[in-house]
Image: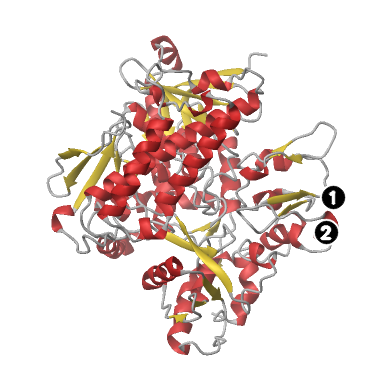
Amino acid sequence: MAGHTDLTTGVLVIGGGLAASWAALSAAQQGADVILVDKGYCGTSGVTATAGVGHWYLPPEAREAEIAARTSAGGDLTEPDWMHRTMEVAWQRLPELDPYYPWPVRDGQPVRNTSVRGPEYMRVMRARIRRAGVTVLDFHPATELLLHGDGSAAGASGIRLQAGGTWTCRASAVILATGGTAFLSRLLGANNNTADGHLMAAEAGARFSGMEFSCFYTLAAAHSTMTRSFPFMYGTYRDCDGNELAFDGPRTGLPMIAKALIRGPVTVVLDRMPQHTRDRLPHVQPNFLLPLLRKGIDPFNDPFPVTLRGEGTIRGTGGIALTGPDCQAGVEGLYAAGDVASREPIVGAASGGGQPNSAWCVASGTWSGRAAAARAAQRPHAATAAGGSVPPRDVGQRPRAAAGSASQADAGIEEIRRIVSRELNDLDKNMFRSGEGLRRSLALLDDLWTQVRPPDDGGAGVSARADGGGGVSREDAGRDALRARETAALVAAGRWVLNSAIVRQESRGMHQRSDTPARDPQFTATVRAWGLDTVLTAVEPKTERQARELCPATRAAS
Amino acid sequence: MIELVIASRCIDCDRCVMVCPTNVFDAVPGGHPVIARQQDCQTCFLCELYCPADALYVGPDCERPEPVDEQTITQTDWPQQYRRDSGWGKNRQDHPNEVWYMQQMLPEALAIRASDHGNAPADLPPP
């Protein structure tokens, strides 16, 4: 048994959530051969599958007002053209769901701007892409890209989680749709979102924008992942001294709860929810009550402890900086769709949670899928195969942590994951930021990077280790290699976040710094970050669009 | 976290092995699937939604296991709760999908807050 699958396709989609499925569908509809590889199961993967999502679904006459409101809320960092294009694609394509998804009907018309149930939506998308001829490979996480000698994308390789062994796929075009990352905050459905696509893109030469806007939080019961926020709006909150917090809504209420949480436990009771809403709640959000009732909590009468779970770059903004209208990722033949791409152009410094992000998945999936299919039509498989391929020049950023004995490596990896999660999620570090605190976190993560980056001699790669050996089963070896790789990705993404937040010496949108509490016009600008051993940043003013290189922010691995 | 594959209900269809996004289960030839990697469970409850036999139980705590016994759990409606309330499987015919109501919740909650200033909840008429 070889323990390896060799594949060739026109378009390779990496990821299995909402954007990945729209991208795969769009490429297949153009006639391309499409393979979709996902770390989990396309249908339950990603943050849409556990949620209820609405889309930005606005008739043309309503869009200017929406753009004006979002521009203001987003701190003047948005780009109207991207917002217009996103809304238009969602407007054109959502009706495609009509035959499959039971929209509510009002006045005889389907109401498509309403919330869509995540599990049903993703189940529909899986069925649609399979019907369109897409080959879906679940439990096939990608761990590295393959590049041609000229630096363009040539495919990817990864691990067969359930079968054991490895896979390689040569492709004419590659779409990254691996989602954002919440840095393991236990945000609902986000454990697989470990910035794997960010790391692959960075190794190939991509850059990031808006990574500093990764400090949005959502309420959940303290013991729970259930970050579904609307029922919490009916809550009465008390701090650790039993004093009621004057919660008037999420904008001022969440920072107030956060401050109270830093001091001690905060409880909530959903006593303001009227009976008619309590009665229908199980049919509105069928998962909301699961973790409460099973803990013996009657949420309408019993106060229970709450927490705020970090949303990282998921309901945050940052991601791969796109370099063209077709969602090119700064590398020839590589595209990015959904939350792995920066949504700064459509929401700026404010969260795109809810409607814009879902519309973005539809739109960026559509653009990247069509562009990738066009590229595949121009460069058929034969050309890809004949051209040969090599791992990216920095492949070496494969982590070495799994090189030691399995138990030793695991201990190291778990500790590193714990530290990254803490530095990127703790309220006093990430919601309430300061230059000093950010630099302290960065020093920690720079040190972690020296532990997860590869040894200078190149060392054994993930692919080699995933073949197993030395008494470790192939399945276990693959999982260990994946976990090490995820950990490197989390550290790398954390360093882009922290470097970007340090460079943005002001407060704007969700990025609030106690040492620079005011908004500064010179930062009506995009902050870009890139690089692995050395992270670089640049501030690109919205007016001149010319990157002004500021400083090599760190030299962690020198 | 995932706690139970309920042996008395499981029909060995291995759907949970197929759909768990964090690959928690292992199939067992000729037997029920097993929880092989409990620590990887992300407490998303989706395995319960997909299980056609109501044979899975996910505990409420996302950080640590809370062992339970099958007898206790099968006396509750918890294993079928998510699937029933979502209208999947045999519940499909008479299920009222009211997800559209989510959009009413924030305005309703803020209106109640503005009106009652911390007093007993106003029972507004349904919209």
Name which of mark 1 and mark 2 comes first in the sequence. 1
Q: Vertically, is A24 above or below A160?
A: below
Q: Which quadrant holds residue A258?
A: bottom left
- Cα separation, mark 1 vs mark 2, equals 9 Å
Percent x, y for residue A471? 67, 20
Q: Vertically, is B84 above or below A346?
A: below
Q: A413 or A430: which is nearer to us?
A: A413
Asked if disc 1 and disc 2 are in contact, CB closer than 8 Å, the reply is: yes
Rendered-image quadrant of the C terminus of chain B: bottom right
Secondary structure at badge 2 equals helix
Q: Vertically, is B99 above or below A452?
A: below
Percent x, y for residue A396? 40, 22
User: Residue under mark 1: which chain is it in?
Assistant: B
Where is mark 2, residue-wise?
Answer: B74
User: Residue under mark 2: which chain is it in?
Assistant: B
Q: Is residue A328 left or right of residue A269?
A: left
The single residue placed furthest to the top in the displayed view is A386
**What is the crowding at mark 2: few (fewer than 14 residues within 10 Å), some, or many (at least 20)?**
some
Amino acid type indicated by mark 2: Thr
User: Residue at the spot x=52%, y=76% of the render?
Assistant: A235
